[in-house]
Image: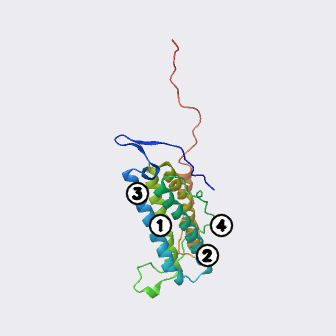
Amino acid sequence: MTQNHFGGETHQNMHTGTVPPQMNHGGHELFDVHEVLSNAIAAMNQAMILRPHVKDPELLDILDRQYRFTLDEYNITVEAFKTGKDPSHPTGSYKMKQGNDFVYGMKQSQPKKPMQNASEISDEVISGFLLGSAKANASGKTMAALETTNPVVRRVLQDSIPNCIEMAYELSIYQNKHHYYQVPQLAQQDMQAILNAYASSVGQPGMPNHTVQ
Protein backbone atom coordinates (compact mmCIF):
# COMPACT_ATOMS: atom_id res chain seq x y z
CA MET A 1 0.00 0.00 0.00
CA THR A 2 1.21 3.50 -0.77
CA GLN A 3 0.90 6.25 1.81
CA ASN A 4 -0.78 9.44 0.59
CA HIS A 5 -0.49 11.31 3.89
CA PHE A 6 0.42 14.97 3.63
CA GLY A 7 -1.52 16.41 6.59
CA GLY A 8 -0.60 19.52 8.53
CA GLU A 9 0.28 22.00 5.77
CA THR A 10 -1.22 25.50 5.74
CA HIS A 11 -1.72 27.11 2.34
CA GLN A 12 -2.13 30.79 1.63
CA ASN A 13 -3.85 32.88 -1.01
CA MET A 14 -1.99 36.18 -1.46
CA HIS A 15 -5.32 38.08 -1.57
CA THR A 16 -7.63 36.25 0.84
CA GLY A 17 -5.28 34.63 3.37
CA THR A 18 -5.42 31.06 4.64
CA VAL A 19 -6.94 28.53 2.23
CA PRO A 20 -9.19 25.86 3.81
CA PRO A 21 -8.35 22.24 2.82
CA GLN A 22 -11.41 21.76 0.60
CA MET A 23 -10.45 24.86 -1.44
CA ASN A 24 -6.77 23.95 -1.73
CA HIS A 25 -6.80 23.57 -5.52
CA GLY A 26 -5.43 25.64 -8.38
CA GLY A 27 -7.54 26.42 -11.43
CA HIS A 28 -5.49 24.21 -13.73
CA GLU A 29 -5.81 21.35 -11.25
CA LEU A 30 -9.60 21.62 -11.11
CA PHE A 31 -9.94 21.17 -14.86
CA ASP A 32 -7.31 18.40 -15.07
CA VAL A 33 -8.74 16.34 -12.21
CA HIS A 34 -12.24 16.88 -13.60
CA GLU A 35 -10.94 15.33 -16.83
CA VAL A 36 -9.31 12.42 -14.95
CA LEU A 37 -12.49 11.62 -13.03
CA SER A 38 -14.66 11.92 -16.15
CA ASN A 39 -12.32 9.56 -18.03
CA ALA A 40 -12.46 7.06 -15.16
CA ILE A 41 -16.26 7.08 -15.23
CA ALA A 42 -16.25 6.66 -19.02
CA ALA A 43 -13.83 3.73 -18.79
CA MET A 44 -15.91 1.96 -16.15
CA ASN A 45 -19.17 2.62 -18.01
CA GLN A 46 -17.61 1.20 -21.15
CA ALA A 47 -16.45 -1.89 -19.28
CA MET A 48 -19.98 -2.48 -17.97
CA ILE A 49 -21.46 -2.11 -21.48
CA LEU A 50 -18.91 -4.53 -22.94
CA ARG A 51 -19.00 -7.08 -20.10
CA PRO A 52 -22.03 -9.10 -21.35
CA HIS A 53 -20.28 -9.60 -24.71
CA VAL A 54 -17.07 -11.14 -23.28
CA LYS A 55 -16.64 -14.80 -24.22
CA ASP A 56 -13.25 -15.68 -22.74
CA PRO A 57 -13.36 -16.33 -18.95
CA GLU A 58 -9.79 -15.05 -18.65
CA LEU A 59 -10.69 -11.71 -20.23
CA LEU A 60 -13.81 -11.49 -18.04
CA ASP A 61 -11.63 -11.99 -14.97
CA ILE A 62 -9.28 -9.21 -16.12
CA LEU A 63 -12.21 -6.87 -16.79
CA ASP A 64 -13.78 -7.51 -13.37
CA ARG A 65 -10.55 -7.18 -11.41
CA GLN A 66 -9.57 -3.98 -13.21
CA TYR A 67 -13.08 -2.54 -12.76
CA ARG A 68 -13.06 -3.14 -9.00
CA PHE A 69 -9.62 -1.62 -8.62
CA THR A 70 -10.43 1.39 -10.82
CA LEU A 71 -13.65 2.02 -8.88
CA ASP A 72 -11.73 2.10 -5.58
CA GLU A 73 -9.14 4.49 -6.99
CA TYR A 74 -11.91 6.67 -8.38
CA ASN A 75 -13.59 6.84 -4.96
CA ILE A 76 -10.47 7.86 -3.03
CA THR A 77 -9.56 10.41 -5.71
CA VAL A 78 -13.02 11.98 -5.40
CA GLU A 79 -12.67 11.93 -1.62
CA ALA A 80 -9.28 13.66 -1.64
CA PHE A 81 -10.40 16.12 -4.34
CA LYS A 82 -13.54 17.21 -2.46
CA THR A 83 -11.96 17.45 1.01
CA GLY A 84 -8.37 18.37 0.20
CA LYS A 85 -7.37 15.89 2.91
CA ASP A 86 -6.05 12.34 3.09
CA PRO A 87 -8.52 9.76 1.73
CA SER A 88 -9.99 7.07 3.99
CA HIS A 89 -7.33 4.61 2.84
CA PRO A 90 -4.12 4.78 0.79
CA THR A 91 -3.82 3.95 -2.91
CA GLY A 92 -3.47 0.23 -3.50
CA SER A 93 -1.09 -1.55 -5.86
CA TYR A 94 -2.64 -3.41 -8.77
CA LYS A 95 -1.21 -6.88 -9.38
CA MET A 96 -1.81 -8.60 -12.70
CA LYS A 97 -2.15 -12.38 -13.01
CA GLN A 98 -0.43 -12.57 -16.42
CA GLY A 99 3.19 -13.58 -16.80
CA ASN A 100 5.62 -11.20 -18.48
CA ASP A 101 6.32 -13.26 -21.60
CA PHE A 102 5.67 -11.73 -25.01
CA VAL A 103 5.66 -13.75 -28.23
CA TYR A 104 7.65 -11.88 -30.88
CA GLY A 105 7.07 -12.00 -34.60
CA MET A 106 4.21 -11.40 -37.01
CA LYS A 107 1.56 -13.98 -37.91
CA GLN A 108 -0.41 -13.57 -41.12
CA SER A 109 -3.91 -12.34 -40.33
CA GLN A 110 -6.80 -10.53 -41.93
CA PRO A 111 -6.31 -6.73 -42.24
CA LYS A 112 -8.02 -4.83 -39.46
CA LYS A 113 -10.90 -2.51 -40.30
CA PRO A 114 -13.74 -0.77 -38.45
CA MET A 115 -16.77 -2.82 -37.48
CA GLN A 116 -19.74 -2.52 -39.81
CA ASN A 117 -22.23 -4.03 -37.37
CA ALA A 118 -22.45 -4.34 -33.57
CA SER A 119 -22.71 -8.13 -33.96
CA GLU A 120 -19.03 -8.15 -34.96
CA ILE A 121 -17.92 -7.37 -31.41
CA SER A 122 -15.37 -9.89 -30.13
CA ASP A 123 -12.87 -10.43 -27.33
CA GLU A 124 -10.25 -8.84 -29.56
CA VAL A 125 -12.35 -5.67 -29.89
CA ILE A 126 -13.25 -5.62 -26.19
CA SER A 127 -9.68 -6.11 -24.98
CA GLY A 128 -8.64 -3.34 -27.39
CA PHE A 129 -11.19 -0.97 -25.84
CA LEU A 130 -9.96 -1.81 -22.34
CA LEU A 131 -6.32 -1.35 -23.35
CA GLY A 132 -7.10 2.03 -24.89
CA SER A 133 -8.84 3.17 -21.70
CA ALA A 134 -5.95 2.09 -19.47
CA LYS A 135 -3.45 3.93 -21.69
CA ALA A 136 -5.62 7.06 -21.77
CA ASN A 137 -5.96 7.03 -17.97
CA ALA A 138 -2.20 6.66 -17.53
CA SER A 139 -1.56 9.65 -19.80
CA GLY A 140 -4.33 11.77 -18.27
CA LYS A 141 -3.26 11.17 -14.68
CA THR A 142 0.36 11.89 -15.54
CA MET A 143 -0.52 15.22 -17.12
CA ALA A 144 -2.82 16.13 -14.21
CA ALA A 145 -0.26 15.20 -11.53
CA LEU A 146 2.34 17.48 -13.10
CA GLU A 147 0.23 20.56 -12.35
CA THR A 148 -1.78 19.52 -9.29
CA THR A 149 -1.13 21.88 -6.37
CA ASN A 150 -2.91 19.99 -3.61
CA PRO A 151 -0.24 17.63 -2.21
CA VAL A 152 -2.67 14.83 -1.29
CA VAL A 153 -4.48 14.84 -4.63
CA ARG A 154 -1.15 14.97 -6.45
CA ARG A 155 0.08 11.95 -4.50
CA VAL A 156 -3.13 10.00 -5.13
CA LEU A 157 -2.82 10.66 -8.86
CA GLN A 158 0.91 9.93 -8.89
CA ASP A 159 0.48 6.63 -7.04
CA SER A 160 -2.30 5.63 -9.43
CA ILE A 161 -0.21 5.98 -12.59
CA PRO A 162 1.78 2.74 -12.10
CA ASN A 163 -1.53 0.91 -11.63
CA CYS A 164 -2.82 2.19 -14.99
CA ILE A 165 0.45 1.06 -16.58
CA GLU A 166 0.12 -2.38 -14.98
CA MET A 167 -3.44 -2.74 -16.26
CA ALA A 168 -2.42 -1.74 -19.78
CA TYR A 169 0.51 -4.16 -19.65
CA GLU A 170 -1.75 -7.00 -18.50
CA LEU A 171 -4.13 -6.35 -21.38
CA SER A 172 -1.32 -6.08 -23.95
CA ILE A 173 0.05 -9.45 -22.82
CA TYR A 174 -3.43 -10.96 -23.05
CA GLN A 175 -3.82 -9.58 -26.56
CA ASN A 176 -0.36 -10.75 -27.57
CA LYS A 177 -1.09 -14.30 -26.37
CA HIS A 178 -4.12 -14.41 -28.68
CA HIS A 179 -2.26 -12.76 -31.59
CA TYR A 180 -4.39 -9.61 -31.38
CA TYR A 181 -1.33 -7.53 -30.44
CA GLN A 182 1.65 -8.63 -32.48
CA VAL A 183 5.19 -7.53 -31.71
CA PRO A 184 7.64 -7.39 -34.64
CA GLN A 185 11.38 -7.36 -34.04
CA LEU A 186 14.18 -5.72 -35.99
CA ALA A 187 16.75 -7.88 -37.73
CA GLN A 188 19.29 -9.11 -35.19
CA GLN A 189 22.08 -7.05 -36.74
CA ASP A 190 20.03 -3.84 -36.56
CA MET A 191 18.89 -4.58 -33.02
CA GLN A 192 22.46 -5.20 -31.91
CA ALA A 193 23.59 -1.94 -33.52
CA ILE A 194 21.02 0.04 -31.53
CA LEU A 195 21.77 -1.84 -28.29
CA ASN A 196 25.46 -1.01 -28.73
CA ALA A 197 24.81 2.64 -29.64
CA TYR A 198 25.07 3.70 -25.99
CA ALA A 199 27.65 3.12 -23.28
CA SER A 200 27.77 3.72 -19.55
CA SER A 201 29.53 6.85 -18.39
CA VAL A 202 32.27 6.64 -15.78
CA GLY A 203 33.75 9.34 -13.62
CA GLN A 204 32.27 12.42 -12.03
CA PRO A 205 31.44 15.76 -13.63
CA GLY A 206 34.10 18.38 -13.11
CA MET A 207 33.55 20.57 -10.09
CA PRO A 208 34.88 24.13 -9.99
CA ASN A 209 37.63 24.77 -7.49
CA HIS A 210 36.71 27.12 -4.67
CA THR A 211 39.38 28.98 -2.79
CA VAL A 212 38.61 29.79 0.79
CA GLN A 213 39.51 33.39 1.52
Quarter occupied by residue 12: top left
Left or right relative to 68: residue 151: left
The residue tagged 3 is 32
x then y, percent, for residue 68: 57, 70
Helix, strand, or loop for circle 4? loop
Q: Is residue 18 above or below residue 174?
A: above
* Secondary element at image label 2: helix
Name the residue beneath numbered marker 1: 40
What amino acid is at disc 1?
Answer: Ala
Image quadrant in which the N terminus is located:
bottom right
Q: Residue at x 51, y 77 (%)?
A: 48
Question: Is 43 or 57 nearer to us in this picture?
Answer: 43
Q: Earlier in the sequence, mark 4 or mark 1?
A: 1
Q: Nearer the viewer, mark 2 or mark 1?
A: 1
Say what amino acid the circle numbered 2 marks.
Asp
Q: Residue at x 42, y 51 (%)?
A: 23
Q: Residues within 10 Å of mark 4 (few under 14, many from 20)?
A: few
One can see residue 186 in this view: no
Q: Which mark is residue 61?
A: 2
Can the viewer see residue 54 in this picture?
yes
Q: Secondary structure at mark 3?
A: helix
Nearest-to-viewer mark from 4 and 3: 3
Between the residue at mark 2 and the residue at mark 4, the CA separation in whole angstroms equals 15 Å
